[in-house]
Image (cartoon, grey):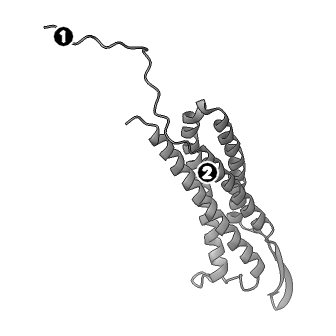
Amino acid sequence: MASTDPEPEYKSSSTPPPPAGVDYFKFDVILRVLLFVSSVVALAVIVSSDQTELVLFQGRPVRKPAKFKYSPAFIYFVAAFSVSALYGLISALASISVIQKPEFKLKFLLHFIFWDALILGITASATGTAGGVAYIGLKGNSHVSWIKVCNVYDKFCRHLAGSIAVALFGSIVTVLLIWLSAYTLHSRVPK
């Protein structure tokens, strides 16, 4: 049985391009610059947190310094946010290049999601680790006889708190970057 409808003409054998969607790359650049700036600020604040005070040691006053490099958690924090700052700079430059050459948008969006998720895991774990150690410094732990030190090293603890707060902001920026990339990819999928 033959059909009376004429056969449709096909102009090309390739699939049609996905819909353009809304271009969020300018917002992406702003968020990536914020990630870079927050990582650098968190690093600068924790690295400049050195403080030396007189403390009693076996009944005698002794000058004891408090530095970030005395704690593995704070060293990890510095390493993680150094990586985050470098990634923020490189990915901001890559995002700017995508604005200039839009044919690479989809490929970069997928790569950005993967790398942003990795950076989020690194920075969130470093922020949590440093926050846990800073909390013990603030409150102590009577169950294991760890005394609080923030009553003596107040400047050091204020620097730690400021650095951890900025780092938390950087982690939130990274979550927003992941959401933005995922939403942009989703908006380009044909309905």
In the displayed structure image, the side of residue 101 where residue 8 appears, left or right: left
Disc 1 secondary structure class: loop
Q: Is residue 102 left or right of residue 183?
A: right
Residue at 64 percent across and 72 percent down: it is 133
The residue that appears at 38% across and 14% down in the rendered structure is: 10
Which image quadrant for residue 129?
bottom right
Residue 50 horizontal/vertical position (percent): 81, 72
Q: Amino acid at mark 2?
A: Ile
Crowding at dot 2, Cα within 10 Å, few <14 / some 14-19 / many 20+, comes out as: many
Write down the quadrant of residue 186 in the picture: top left
Q: Which residue is mark 1?
A: 4
Amino acid found under the numbered disc labelled 1: Thr
Residue underneath mark 2: 119
Spatial separation of the CA atoms under disc 2 and disc 1? 60 Å
Give the quadrant of the C terminus. Answer: top left
For residue 63, say whether it is visible.
Answer: yes
The secondary structure type at the circle numbered 2 is helix
Asked whether 180 or 170 is in front, the reply is 180
Residue at x 61% of width, y 33% of height: 102
* Image: 58 above or below 190: below
Q: Residue at x 59, y 65 (%)?
A: 128
Please, is residue 21 above or below residue 60 in the view? above
